[in-house]
Structures are given as structure tokens and as C-alpha cells.
Image (spheres, rainbow, N blue to C red):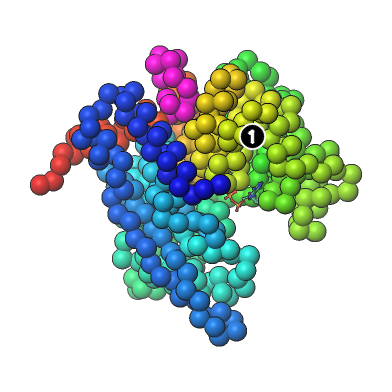
Amino acid sequence: MTTESALDTALSQLRRAVEQLQLSENEWQTLSTPRRVLEVAVPLRRDNDHVEMYKGFRVQYSTTRGPSKGGVRFHPDIDMDETIALAMLMTWKCALTNLPYGGAKGGIAVDPSTLSLTENERLTRRYTSEILPIIGPERDIPAPDVGTDEKNMAWMMDTYSVNAGFSVPGVVTGKPIVLGGSLGRTSATGDGVAISTREALIARDINPIGATVAIQGFGKVGYWAAVALENMGLRVVAVSDVRGGVTGFSSIHDLWSHFLAEGNINAPGTDRLTNEELLHLDVDVLIPAALADSITEKTAVGIKAKIVVEGANAPTTPEGDAILNDKGILVVPDILANSGGVIVSYFEWVQDKQNYFWNAGEVRENLNAIMMKAFKEVETTSNESRVTWREASHMIGVGRVAEAHRLRGLYP
Ligand code: NAD
């Protein structure tokens, strides 16, 4: 996996949408340039008193349709190019689902598994303090991503609030409920992936009940998608994490209980699979829900699933995508399939602004309504313009941002 390719992929998808929408060269220039990029040094005093320096990033790709919004990733491989690519994808995702946001992304080049809890807290707080001048509920609202979760969001919210002198829950989303988090946020991305899977199966005339699914990645997205899919009556037959995969488990619930007890997914009675074997299983749906670039020229050839639902961001390279399309495999693209997370983050931000909190049913209903609307728009555009679902999703998202630029005009 190269980090450059995530940006190359994002730019080539944008170029295609610009051509399909017949936008001008001026519009391409505007749309292909991030508005604000910030790299910061994040010093950390380790528990043994040594000081180490880490690189931190925050990219506000677009603020044209509202404050920028996007996750904070702790991963040793992230760099500025990948952060720009992911912030660009957030921009089209928020526009596709018609949320009043631009797009952002950030993170620290660190492996969080090497940090103690107190080191993680100090690193998170110092990073927050370094990017503090450019974030805020009206400017840019971070959220969890790979390697971060609600505890990091609590520390970010506290650091921002201490500096403001009062409590500012709306500065981040994905917070614990007691700090102004939303019901349903933890499972939201996985819930949205499950809604996408169900709708894609229906679009292909396959009964979702009993349909088989393999999921690469058993983290926040993969796990919650698996739970929601089982609740909808689908059969999750294989999952994997960074150490490999398993098949032959009785239920996700049982596998999770084993994972919590033992810290691995090798439950008794299951059969081991390599990550490549999981990608090539004969299932109805394959859900890549780990990192970027897992479906490539090399791995796409052996994929037998009828539908690929992209839980992860940018899991398919352009070459891999071309192969899937040639094979007639329907791909539900990341900016549609995994938009459930940012949709419920939006609900959290709205609830924080109003100091009025919704019940779980309201969150679920509104998530379903927004996703179904985006889904229908993508399906219609795909049919009318004879383009793939990925192209249709980008046409809608990019088109909305371009229109907002046109209407706002160029200052001065
Ligand atoms: P996470 O850190 O909770 O989980 C990642 C999972 O992927 C872990 O199980 C890890 O072991 C596994 N993994 C890593 N490398 C792997 C490999 N080579 N093969 C198989 N498994 C591997 O992260 P997450 O929040 O679940 O995010 C996963 C993806 O979904 C990322 O691309 C992220 O950007 C995207 N995403 C996350 C959210 C969210 O709300 N968390 C929202 C939208 C998109």
C-alpha cells in the first residue's frame, strides 16, 4: 500500500466527475485544491520521561458548504498526501448526503498500540492544542477514525473547552453520551454499511434474508456492520482483522465474546483464513472495512462476490475498480456506503447546538431516511447517465460543491 495512491485515486475520481459534469478548468482548479493544510509537531513526554516528536496533520479540504468535518486517525503510515485524499473524500461524502458541511481529516503518525493510556491522553491533548486555532463547532469538527475512539474525543473536547473557559461539546463528535454524544453514533457507520448492503442486494434482485457476507476488518466499522447485518437476517460467514481471518463461527455475538475475552478472533471451532482468501470467498457481498487499497489489480481478479460495499475509505484502487466493473460486480462506493458515521455525527452536532437530545429511534429513522435518499439519487443518476455507482456518487457530491462555489462567487 502506498500513501500516494490514495491521493492519486481521489484526484482521478474527481477528474472523471469534473469531465462528466462538463465543469470548467477554473472549477477543476478550485475543486482539486485543499483550502487549508496544517502540519504540526506533537511532542510527547513518555512515561519513562523521554520526549519524542510526532507529526500531526489537519486538512480542511473544503468549507464552501459549511464547517469542515472529518475524523482524526492515529496510524504510523499517515502523511499529508493521504490526509488530503481523505479530506477530499469527506467533502464529496458530506455533499452527497447533503449535510451542511465541507470536508476535513487529521491525525498523528503514531501507532496507538505503542502508547500507554496516559501517553495517549497527553498526545491527544497536545495535538488538540496545536490545531486549536483552526477547529471549533463553527469551523471544523473532528471525529474518531482508525486508531481513535470516544475517549480521544472526550480529551479533545475537554482541551478545547478548558481553553475556551466553558464547555463546548459541539467541537467534536463521537463523544461519550454523558458529554453530549448521540445515541447511535458508535454503531452508525456499521449501521449505514448494513443499510447499503441491504439496498444494493435489493437493487440486484437478491433477497437480503440469508444472503452471505464476508467482512475484512473487525474494528468499529466492520464489527457494527456485522451486528446490524445479522439483525437484518443476513449471514456473516467470515471476518478478518490485521492478523488474518476466520470462518465457521456460530454468530458474530459469540465471536465478539471470544474477542473480548481473548483479544483475538480465533474462537474454538473456527477455521483460519488469510486476508486474501477472505477477499476471494464465494459470497453475495464483500465488505472491505479495514484500510485503503485492499482491492487492487492483483486482488480484484479473484473476487467472486456479486456486490462490494466499501465500509473503509478508498479500499479500491482505480485498477481494482476497473476489474470489478468488467466482472459486472456492483460496487457501493465509500462515500455512500460508509456515510452513516458522518450523518449521525451531524445529528450529534445538531443536538449539541440545541442542547436537546433525541431518542435512539429518532436517530435510526433519520439515518435511514438520509441514506435512502442518497441511495435513490445515486441509483437514478447511475441509470440516467449510464455511469457506475461510484461515478454517480462523485457526480452528485462534486456537482453540489461546484454549485455552491458558483453561487458564492469568488472573493474579492
Ligand atoms: P478501527 O481501527 O476500529 O478498525 C480497523 C480494523 O481493520 C481492525 O480490526 C484492524 O485489525 C483491521 N485491519 C487493519 N489492517 C488490516 C488488514 N491489512 N487486513 C485486514 N484487516 C485489517 O477502524 P474503523 O474506525 O473501523 O475504520 C475502518 C475504515 O473505515 C477506515 O478506512 C476508516 O477511515 C473508515 N471509516 C470509519 C468511520 C468510523 O466512524 N469509524 C467512518 C467512515 C469510514
- Main structural element of the magenta stretch: helix, strand or loop? helix
Q: Which residue is mark 1?
A: 299
Q: Nearer the viewer, residue 36 or 154?
A: 36
* Identity, as a three-letter code, of the amino acid under mark 1: Thr
Question: Mark 1: which secondary structure?
Answer: helix
The location of residue 273, given as percent across then percent down, is 78, 41
Q: Nearer the viewer, residue 173 or 240?
A: 240
> Residue at the bottom extreme?
49
Q: Nearer the viewer, residue 270 or 320?
A: 320
Image side of residue 132 versus residue 250, left or right:
left
From where the camera sits, is residue 178 visible?
no
- Placement of 397 over or under 153, stated as above or below: above
Q: Quadrant of residue 276?
A: top right
The location of residue 166, given as percent across then percent down, is 37, 70
Whether residue 127 is in magenta: the answer is: no
From where the camera sits, is residue 403 visible?
yes
Q: Residue at x 38, y 67 (%)?
A: 40
Image side of residue 348 versus residue 133, left or right:
right
Q: Residue at x 29, y 45 (%)?
A: 33
The location of residue 399, given as percent across then percent down, is 31, 30
Bin the neighbour count of mark 1 within 10 Å (Cα to Cα): few under 14, some 14-19, many 20 and up. Answer: some
Whether residue 384 is in magenta: the answer is: yes
For the magenta stretch, what is the residue range? 380-393
